[in-house]
Image (tube, rainbow, N blue to C red):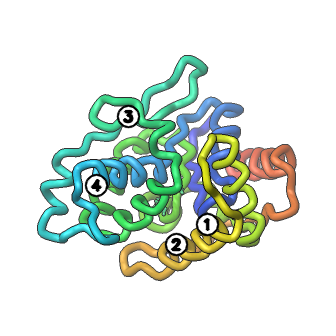
Amino acid sequence: MKKITVAIDGYSSCGKSTMAKALARQVGYAYIDTGAMYRCVGLYALTHSYLQDGKVDEGFLQEMMSGIQITFRPNSEGRSEPYLNGVGVESQIRTLAISEAASVVSQYRYVRSAMVSQQQAMGQSKGVVMDGRDIGTVVFPDAELKIFVMASDEVRARRRYDELVAKGEEGLCYENVLAMVRERDYRDTHRAESPLVQAEDALVLDNSHMTIEEQNEWLLAAFERAVRG
Ligand code: DC
């Protein structure tokens, strides 16, 4: 069967990675979480003090990026996990602080072009499901299947809040998480470099009122049509 590229873009916390992972597993494709790559850069920027007062000094971007190597390796259950300079960072990058740091570093052109080249290399043989913000518009504008996922900001904040509580994050308040979701949406859609926009040829999925099973079925059906098409 012919292999295709599946690009899944959309707002933060709208369940992109859940559906992307499920599809990749079902159809035997590689899954690449590009948000995890920006989170790795954010983690590095924070821990090496490149990120200060909500920004990185442009003069240090090249030095910062030259210190970063991001790879993915399967865990014991076969799920791919990010490694930053050889160290597994899956749980470290899922905190609220790293969400913020990733959102900041992903605004810089230098950071984006380094990440985009790496993503293009990872997906060059097709047979890949990649999720992010600019996959169908910048990384793989010729992807055979493009999905743009959305859900209301309240639904996304509730999902994010529940996820963070389940991971043991303390002192959380739903209203703050909602404010952060809106702030990240604003930054993701208004940045000068590759802002989040829906590709013209993307299929739109609003999953505000769908179960995970329903969205997985919807995606699998779209995939099967694209492979036949
Ligand atoms: O999907 P996520 O929440 O893990 O993404 C983390 C941050 O990285 C988010 O603020 C948007 C940014 N990002 C991006 O700019 N481009 C991508 N392809 C993926 C994520």
The picture quadrant where one finds residue 31 is top right
Number of numbered discs on residues: 4
Marks 2,1: beta carbons within 8 A:
yes
**Residue furthest to the front:** 171
User: Which is more N-terminal, label 4 or label 1?
Assistant: 1
Find the distance from the CA under tag 3 to the CA under tag 2.
Answer: 25 Å
Q: Is residue 227 visible?
A: no
Tell me, yes or no, whether the two marked residues, 3 and 1, touch with CB atoms within 8 Å: no
Q: CA distance from mark 3 to mark 4?
A: 15 Å
Compare marks 3 and 1 and give the one earlier in the sequence.
Answer: 1
The label on residue 83 is 3
Q: Which residue is mark 1?
A: 11
Q: Secondary structure at mark 1?
A: loop
Residue type marked 3: Tyr
Residue 123 % position (x, y): 43, 44
The residue beneath circle 4 is: 45
Is label 4 in a helix, a strand or a loop? helix
